Amino acid sequence: MCLALPARIVEMRKQDIGIVDLGGVRKEVSLALVDDLQVDDYVIVHVGYALSKLDPEEAERTLRIFAEMESMPGNVGVGA
Amino acid sequence: MKYVDEFRDGELANGLASTIARAADTGRNYSFMEFCGGHTHAISRYGVTDLLPANIQMIHGPGCPVCVLPIGRIDLAIGLALDQGVILCTYGDTLRVPASDGLSLMKAKARGGDVRMIYSTADVLAIARDNPDRDVVFLAIGFETTTPPTALLIEQAKNEGIGNLSVLCNHVLTPSAITHILESPEVREYGTLPLDGFIGPSHVSTVIGTQPYEHFAREYRKPVVISGFEPLDVMQGILMLVRQVNEGRAEVENEFFRAVTRGGNRKAQTLVAKIFELRRTFEWRGLGEVPYSALQIRSEYAAFDAEQRYGLRYAPVADNKACECGAILRGVKKPTDCKIFGTVCTPETPMGSCMVSSEGACAAHYTYGRFKDVEIVAA
Ligand code: SF4
């Protein structure tokens, strides 16, 4: 029920409507709840609505922390 | 899928697992509750518990909106469909929740009720437009993630002057439920639950931010880590909790900062505040009455409030006696403690709500973890 997925905006249509790519499937979603979106942005989509923008740099940073953890015992991990 | 698969990487998971094992103090136990059904699902599905040291215990919380919707509220919706002849729209998960008299919305449909599954509130608007001579009611459920779309539906209906649409609102709030778990009087009845911290909801927090949990961490001295729903996110969240406990800290930390900020989505919050106000109290299935834990439609939008429009009166209905959902949702019992788990009650024939959605503790355990707990006895 609460699961939402990251999806890339591939097309902007009028009236807060966008087309996203969800793992190869194109879907129409409402962009009415998030400001300043453009094509190629990643958004978290839930029940047909974009709820927030996904920050690719932060995503990469999180992944880097996971990867570093293997080689560096006792490192500090993700902070607040 | 980008930003999904990378967060399910098995090798990284093993790396994280050994870091957690190193961080955990062997001289003590850690009990963490994952509030959200999405986490429960991820933990069961990816076997996260198997990767954790034995002294870290994950407890399933009440964070599945389908599981906490009380029978009496579904009865209201069934009444509207069968007695008032409305077109009743709702999300798919809600259709199978067992209600009174052996009914569910699905069974009400089989009896002739016009019950329709929708994917998005935009579908509800379309149905109302296409059926101007019928009354359309949206049975709205969900936490802070599904509330903004409902608010938008009501606003659009008002702007377009759509008169045949109303909403039966059951939107509930996560921070008040977490508080309730820690301090409700029923804790005595069910026994106390030693909790060292919470994995906080991620998608809910995309909307409300991490800030609402700060007061809670201060007041109750419990650490909260907002974590994403992928298995690596959950494990990282656990590691961050272990570290907070070790260092005697009780703070709100954000693991899911790729999509969550401290303030959340202000645009969505403003819209929700415009359409909804707090209910003084709301019954949660399994938790009972929880003060200020749910939303109702403001009087300016009363025309779109199904409760007002049809003069609905809520009547509480007791759960099936055998069902242990109440104790399970509070984390004091496990699905296998229920006598009818996996026999009478299965995902195909759910008796209690925890067996309905894949995010419910019983369904997650039945689907992904059942056999682990079954003792193998030599014949
Ligand atoms: S197994 Fe079924 S009846 Fe038992 S607690 Fe779970 S949902 Fe309720």
Image (cartoon, coloured by chain):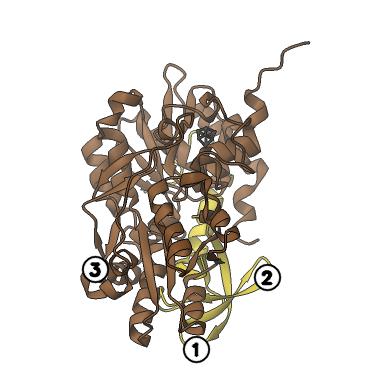
Q: Amino acid at mark 2?
A: Val
Residue found at x 28% / y 46%? B176
Label 1 belongs to which residue? A14
Is the CB atom of the residue marked by disc 2 within 8 angstroms of ligand 1's nearest atom? no
Label 2 belongs to which residue? A25
Please identify the quadrant where the C terminus of chain B is shown.
Answer: top right
**Label 1 Cα crowd, 10 Å radius (few <14 / some 14-19 / many 20+):** few
The kind of secondary structure element at disc 1 is: loop
Residue found at x 59% / y 51%? B7
Q: Which chain hosts label 2?
A: A
Image coords of residue B246 (percent x, y): 37, 28
Q: Which chain hosts label 1?
A: A
Which tint is chain A?
yellow
The kind of secondary structure element at disc 3 is: loop
Q: Disc 2 to disc 3, how far (Cα)?
A: 38 Å
Residue B141 as seen in the image, left or right of residue B126: left
Q: Nearer the viewer, residue B283 or B18?
A: B283
Q: Amino acid at mark 3?
A: Arg
Number of callouts in the render? 3
**Label 3 Cα crowd, 10 Å radius (few <14 / some 14-19 / many 20+):** some
Image disc number at residue B316: none
Image coords of residue B73 (percent x, y): 39, 53
Is the CB atom of the residue marked by disc 1 within 8 angstroms of ligand 1's nearest atom? no
Label 3 belongs to which residue? B298
Q: Which chain is brown?
A: B
Q: Can I make out residue B164 in this image? A: yes
Asked if disc 2 and disc 1 are in contact, CB closer than 8 Å, the reply is: no
Residue at far top of view = B379
Q: Amino acid at mark 1?
A: Lys
Residue found at x 55% / y 61%? A5
| Quarter residue B14 falls in | top right
